Image (spheres, coloured by chain):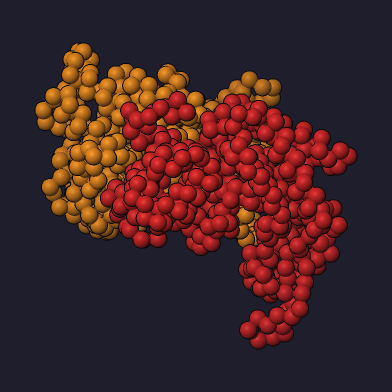
Chain colours: A orange, B red
Amino acid sequence: MKSNLTPLGPKADKDTVRRSNLSLVLRAVRDEGEGEATRAGVAARVGLTRAAVSSLVEQLLESGFLTESGKTFSGQAGRPGTALKTARTGPSGLGVEVNIDYVSVCVVDLAGTGRVRLTEHLDNRGTPPAEVLARAARIAARTLDSAREQELFPVGVALALPGLVSGGAVRQAPNLGWNQVPAEELFAASLAAERPGRRELPVRSENEANLAALAELWFGGLDRVRSFLYLTGEIGVGGALVIDGELLRGAHGFAGEIGHVVVDARGPQCRCGSRGCLEQYAGQAALLRAAGVEGGGGLAVAELEKRVRAGDERAVGAVAEAGRMLGRVLSGAVNLLDPDAVVLGGIYRNLMPWLSPHVDEELTGRVVSGLWSPGGGRLRASSVAGDAARGAAALVMTDVLADPVAYADRAQA
Amino acid sequence: MKSNLTPLGPKADKDTVRRSNLSLVLRAVRDEGEGEATRAGVAARVGLTRAAVSSLVEQLLESGFLTESGKTFSGQAGRPGTALKTARTGPSGLGVEVNIDYVSVCVVDLAGTGRVRLTEHLDNRGTPPAEVLARAARIAARTLDSAREQELFPVGVALALPGLVSGGAVRQAPNLGWNQVPAEELFAASLAAERPGRRELPVRSENEANLAALAELWFGGLDRVRSFLYLTGEIGVGGALVIDGELLRGAHGFAGEIGHVVVDARGPQCRCGSRGCLEQYAGQAALLRAAGVEGGGGLAVAELEKRVRAGDERAVGAVAEAGRMLGRVLSGAVNLLDPDAVVLGGIYRNLMPWLSPHVDEELTGRVVSGLWSPGGGRLRASSVAGDAARGAAALVMTDVLADPVAYADRAQA
């Protein structure tokens, strides 16, 4: 039996309740979407009185978190209300994705909308980690300059990193060749050096597939899907689990490593030390090799897509085989976790028409619940919205949305 | 970003707070264990004042949930306190495990201690589900008679069933041959017929591996392990996931089906419709066949254990091979979920000395985090305490522990 021995009613003082309700109202306005929110609508949504909501809205308007525009007619009787929106300036979040062959930096505003994006394609393998992170910090500093011109002031940074991330460090990132890299510390020092005299930004870090999954959850139009498995085909095969709208991080933060589930115990050696991992069958390198496409990176993937669309037999066959291997591993994961959906991102997204029938076939044949069927809607391509840099930036914003008062000094330029 | 739009502070009235605090104190006394709980100790543990705890304890003593015994010396300065214990009579839970070749019924008291147990070994395959459940109800009725003699009054029943359970029904139980069986309804009707004129007991149902995992969590001495994968070798291979002390049930209640994770895509046909499922390599039937032991059930398993202990080469080899297959599938599950531990129960428990080195070897070689090593303590045998009937009975008790006042009428004989 659960032993949650926290006494009820930690006599929350008025100030705490008000701060929490400010957060509630701010999030409600954001969730209503462009130009749809009224005081009455928010009151109905959050279950507070109209008067209470009006007072909270006043404070959020004054401190610059909300803006108000023209009249809106709700379709109901009574006076028209004015439409509320989250401010397009003020506190924002900075997300920095450091991946194998690119660095992408993104700034999002209160609504989670991407407002600035700077991506540089470059091969990060073979470069010392400190140098990669210093380069990422330079890209971030440039992005911050653009944000400032739009009167957006990031309150923190989240790093999206391809590997096992915990305690601020990359424990292992086989595809980058990183081992025990104190990524947060290195990045923070580099960023501070790029911006002498400026307020230092707190830095956090997270696995990139986890952040891409959060972006998918928050912005991907998944509707009522609250539990899903997210796979992203990159040079590695990343994975993340979202259960009831929350990331499942695992006991040490290492959950989601679906790329290293065994397909064939005696299969090819994997960089992780094991043999026959999914990555060896459905990762980018394996897929390109099987399709007979030379080289790697974005150009090679584009060539693969071109050949598949043109009906090239070898390319189509390679994608089908990768689909079967994905489906086999996914059927096991679905039997274990019973998610609402499986979302495929990265290089799989554009390949879905050729990939999904084979994934579906394995899932249909192997998922015990019988809930998985071809075209049943449970297997989905990720949306473009689901990228790790945006997820990272939005993660920073969760702090602001949870307690806007704490960031009121940044809300007004 | 999360959209939890529930307003803070649902102005809990005094009565609600008091009921919740009664639960808190009752659970604190239970958690302190035999003869260890004093008012002062409970107050320190739950963070309420000594005066508040004394008043709550009085009410729990009066309504029969607690008893008080002789003096205890806390080792600290001050007056000795009296030792508090949960009552050994009153509200209790009834757990009914209906498995392939046995029915086991258990009554637990407030402390979760098993007080009555009635097990009948019989083959439930080939018998119509309604008949199996009627038989289970007869066994339950007999158990209730024994409980009444001990002044224990079950307040509800939980059924532990081997298969996909949701909405009160067994959706599918391949090893029993059940399909869409409304188990709760059938059992409740049979139990009511066995006990004319008696108060009807509410019936709930749950997958048996889930309940065995809860029993392991609550009574298995797992210490600080709060996230684990539980596997139970029976005729099928059942599984359950406990994450942060909570069952992960999945979007439809079907999570944990590790027995149907693929080992070899072209392997033997499984009863679930797929091929090469773990069950075909490490389930009871496969293990007995590979070891050359004839027959099935408890006697055959005992024979297998005897041969393994005697060093019979074929038996030892069969167990080793099953261990490798378990390890392969478990390495994938650990890469996905990053649990603190893996617990093996059922027929695996007694085979651990021969099984675990092979499971460990696969886990060590294949888990990306590098946290798994031979004898590292993460792979464990389940305790005897971890049985599904006890877990089911204890599940019923969570309601009583959460709101004792609601059951005060049953607390006094």
Residue sitting at the far top: A310
Image point 76% across, 78% down: which residue? B70
Residue A112 x/y as whole percent: 41, 37
Image point 20% across, 45% down: which residue? A271
Residue A319 x/y as whole percent: 25, 23
Left or right, A195 with reference to A398:
left
Image point 67% across, 59% down: which residue? B113
Image point 18% across, 33% down: which residue? A285
Viewer-proximal residue among A333 and A21: A333
Tell me the quadrant of the picture where the C terminus of chain B can be found.
bottom right
Residue A91 x/y as whole percent: 41, 46
Left or right, A165 with reference to A56:
left
Left or right, A130 with reference to A90:
left
- Compared to residue B52, the image places residue A155 above or below, namely above
Residue A260: which quarter of the image?
Answer: top left
Residue A370 in view (yes/no): yes
- Compared to residue A163, the image places residue A287 above or below, namely above
Residue A322: which quarter of the image?
Answer: top left
- Compared to residue A249, the image places residue B266 above or below, namely above
Residue sitting at the far bottom: B77
Residue A275 x/y as whole percent: 24, 42
Viewer-proximal residue among B97 and A19: B97
